[in-house]
Image (cartoon, rainbow, N blue to C red):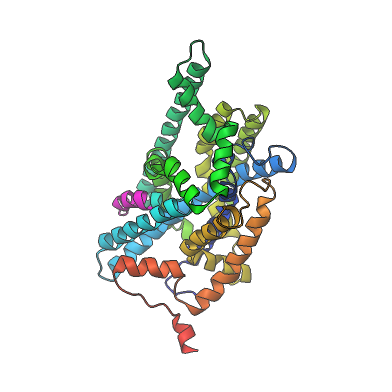
Amino acid sequence: MTSPDRIQTLDIVRGVAVMGILLMNIVAFAMPSAAYYNPAAYGGAEGVDLGVWTTMFVAVDGKMRGLFSFLFGASLLLVADRAEAKGEDPGAVHYGRMGWLLLFGLAHLYLLWWGDILAHYALVGMIAFLFRDLPPHKLLILGLVCAGTGFVLLAITGADALTLYANAHGAGASADAVAGWMGYEKSFGTPPADYLANELAAHRGSYGDLLAWRWAHDKDSPLRTLLYVGPETLGYMLLGMAGLRSGMLTGIWTRARYAKWAAIGFGIGIPGYAALAALAIARDFDTRHVILSVLLLAAILRPPMIAGWAALIILLARPGGPLTARVGAAGRMAFSNYLGTSLICTTLFYGYGFGLYGTLGRAELYLVVIGVWALILLWSKPWLDRFAYGPLEWLWRSLARWKIQPFRNKRAIAT
């Protein structure tokens, strides 16, 4: 049962985003971290594995995360507006939510999985709230400016990488230059065999081994992510706020208008991403070209692709359809499904669980994705038929409001 004050298109788009983000995150769960950007690092870079990487890079990489950010910005506005309508202080409600989300995210990062996005969203969400009263056109402009600022930061990173490469490979290269370039090799290239062996051993070992590895390599992850990705994420949240205010994300546009935006977004993004994939492949995934194509130039193409995805999802959604209802339920429980996915995947791949880390090829991982998707679709709607919120949504709401919230669905209680 859907609450009458919910905007169903937001739930549907969020459901696609929370499921789609696993298409990229599965690599981060199951393989050494460099494989996320560079298939030559681990997991296969030829044949069907190369085909899978190319498809994911062109269609999914960064787009589902961006779509999730759009939806986060839109939801931020909705929560604030509804709090204000009830006579509550929207700032107190919002910052209470962000404070608890930050704690959830840090626990997720340090105790479960290095790829957490919740802490980052909490920090950026604290900033995005300051702009909630801007009209749609100003949110759009500021969002694009922030996304552009993010690109500039990535460009600076790219320039630093090329400088380090030249210094590390020139005559009389200093130890600092070599070490600096090796940091880029470990993140975006083909890490040294001993580094890969240590990363594999840590993830296949005990829980204590994994905590030690994560603390050594990711303890400052929230600050690094905020510095390098924060402006881009803020831009996407502001664009999502503009999308809500303009009606784009609420489904009130005409079908012709959604079709136009989908055609523009994919018309720009797909050829551009395909060209970047071809460049990386032609250069045998040389680290410099991975940084240039996969990290830097791809950022320019993301906003139109994200908008295209949002328009296409809304265009294809069939109100009342059984699949649409299940995807919408998955979106209503995005927090529970996001963390639930981490619990499932870390248990499957890490040494304290089934120990499959580093044992499956890139293409094989998508059999796991299909299985997790099936679980998400199977459990989300029946749960919401009985309960008002997902389990973690209920906990988050209760903590943020310092009051136990109703848990059972009123319709379920009546029957």
The residue furthest bottom is 415
Residue 43 can be seen in this image? yes
Q: Say whether residue 63 is left or right of residue 400.
A: right
User: Image quadrant of residue 105?
Assistant: bottom left
User: Image quadrant of residue 104?
Assistant: bottom left
Magenta-colored span = 122-135
Most common secondary structure along the magenta stretch: helix
Q: Say whether residue 198 is left or right of residue 119.
A: right
Q: Say whether residue 170 is left or right of residue 283.
A: left
Q: Which is nearer the eye, 112 or 224?
A: 112
The image position of residue 412, as x and y in percent, is: 49, 84
**Residue at figure coordinates x 46%, y 26% from the top left:** 180
For residue 365, above or below residue 150: below
Q: Which is nearer the eye, 225 or 301?
A: 225
Number of callouts: 0
The image position of residue 111, as x and y in percent, is: 44, 54
276 is within the stretch colored magenta: no
Residue 251 can be seen in this image? no
**Residue at figure coordinates x 35%, y 46% from the top left:** 138
**Residue at figure coordinates x 55%, y 49% from the top left:** 205
The residue furthest top is 171
132 is within the stretch colored magenta: yes
The image position of residue 221, as x and y in percent, is: 41, 43
The image position of residue 407, as x and y in percent, is: 41, 77
The residue furthest right is 47
